[in-house]
Image: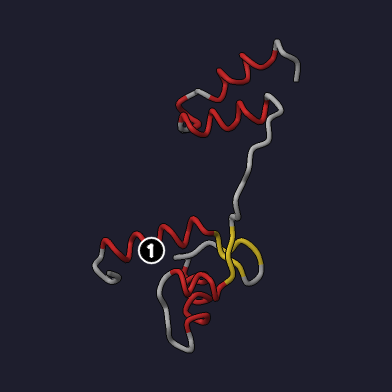
Amino acid sequence: MTVEDKPIFMAFCQIPRFNLSACQIAAIERVVDGREETIGPVAMTYADAAAALSFTSANSVKTIEKYVREGKLVKAAPGRVTIESVRALGAGRVKEGVAA
C-alpha cells in the first residue's frame, strides 16, 4: 500500500455498513502505519472455559462440548472455544440470574 492509498483505505473502513468502532479503526490504522498491534489470545480450552463459567462438576468439560454442539459457544479449534463466546455466554448467565 502506498502513502496515497492510506486515506482511501481508511475512509473505506469508516463506512457504517462495516460497523467498525473507533477503536477498531484506530487499530487498523496502526497496522497500516506498520506499528505492531498486539493481539491477545482468541481461544481457550474447554477446561478453561468451564472454569471461566464457574462450572465445577466432574462433567464440566462435557457440558462445554454440549454447548458447542448447541451453538451456545463457538468452536475455534478442536478442544477450544472462542473467548468472546465464553464472555457472551457468561454475560447472559449473569443477566438471567444464573451466576452471581
Furthest-right residue in this view: 2
Please name the residue shown 42% across and 70% down the image. Answer: 53
Please name the residue shown 50% across and 70% down the image. Answer: 49
Task: Count the labels in the image.
Answer: 1
Please name the residue shown 56% across and 73% down the image. Answer: 46
Which quadrant: the C terminus? bottom left
Which quadrant: the N terminus? top right
68 vs 21, nearest the viewer: 21
Furthest-bottom residue in this view: 58
Local secondary structure at mark 1: helix
x then y, percent, for residue 58: 48, 89
Q: Residue at label 1?
A: 90
x then y, percent, for residue 13: 55, 25
Which amino acid is tagged 1? Gly
Residue 65 sits above or below residue 12 on the image? below
Q: Is residue 36 left or right of residue 89?
A: right
